[in-house]
Amino acid sequence: MAKDEWRTSADHRLLRQRAYVYRYIREFFHERDVTEVETPILSRAGNTDPNISSFTLDFSGHSNAGPSKRWLRTSPEFPLKRLVAGGMGDCYEMGKVFRNGEYGSRHNPEFTLLEWYRTGWDHRRLAEEAVALVLGVYALFDKTLSVQSHTYSSLFQAALALDPHTASIGELQNAVATVASINTDGLSRDDLLDILLTHAIEPTLPASQLTVIHDFPQSQCALAKIREAKVPVAERFELYVGGIELANGYHELNDAVEQRRRFILDQNIRAQRGLSVPDIDEYLLQAVAELPDCAGVALGVDRLLMSVLGVDRLSRIVAFDFSAA
């Protein structure tokens, strides 16, 4: 160990600016009558998403406390929805979340996530508020961004001349071959779409632009409602600054039967991939049955800070990143 490895990798000035942004975020929601809450970091049920890996630990206390195996939260989504379903109304949480295996210039196994819910709103209205928040943070530093909104489909048609909702697997594989040297054998339709999004579309998004992408393929609905139409779409949006994804939001599904079906599908995919299979969160499913019409969004605070402060590594805006924790 080098002599000064105990020191922070971040500039103290940037850490003070981080605190300044935190204060602004809290004032932003206070002015809009959105209540700050705290929810558990440890849960008896984990995230079933096949693309997210969770940390687990064992509780050694009294068995009356419930299952000994606990999962570190990957987001506060489930308990926040339980609060909303129980009548809490509009609320938000800003705090640490944890994802195993994610480390790099834009990732840290523990990071700060801001998540909030608005009752009676859909994903498009919530996207407007998320845009307002990001523009407000930029204004703190006398910076501006232009704003553009696109459907998922229109971006693919403009960049690749294909419709992501109707293109065949072969067409998607051919498109991938033009932008990346990746073996596509065995990859699913959504795997191919994700590669095209990250390799052909994200790099083209202007650095000075805040981009809203909405109405995703129904197969990428996660916990969002599906809008029935000639081509059904997931009522979901993502927010980007340049090619950096900042936020992911949904017009929230409030059908418990459909939510259970999606969780079971996730579990099956995880089992096929040889991954751990978390139990389904039964508390959440009970709450989903009572969930009012609402929209929710999760925004990565560290990435927002990287973007507005103009730094290229997450380690520069956290006191101690994972390698030095």
Image (tube, rainbow, N blue to C red):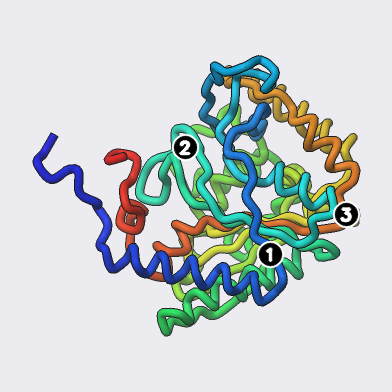
Q: x%, y% of residue 35?
A: 69, 63
Q: Residues within 10 Å of mark 2 (few under 14, many from 20)?
A: few
Checking the image for residue 182, the label placed there is 2
Element under disc 1: helix
On screen, residue 5 versus residue 314, left or right, reads: left
Q: Residue at x 86, y 49 (%)?
A: 291
**Which residue is denoted by mark 3 in the rendering?**
292
Q: Earlier in the sequence, mark 1 or mark 2?
A: 1
Checking the image for residue 154, the label placed there is 1
Above or below for 46 versus 85: above
**Circle 1: residue type:** Ser
Q: Residues within 10 Å of mark 3 (few under 14, many from 20)?
A: many
Above or below for 192 versus 313: above
On screen, residue 306 versus residue 81, left or right, reads: left
**Circle 3: residue type:** Pro
Q: x%, y% of residue 88?
A: 79, 55
Viewer-nearest of labels 3 and 1?
3
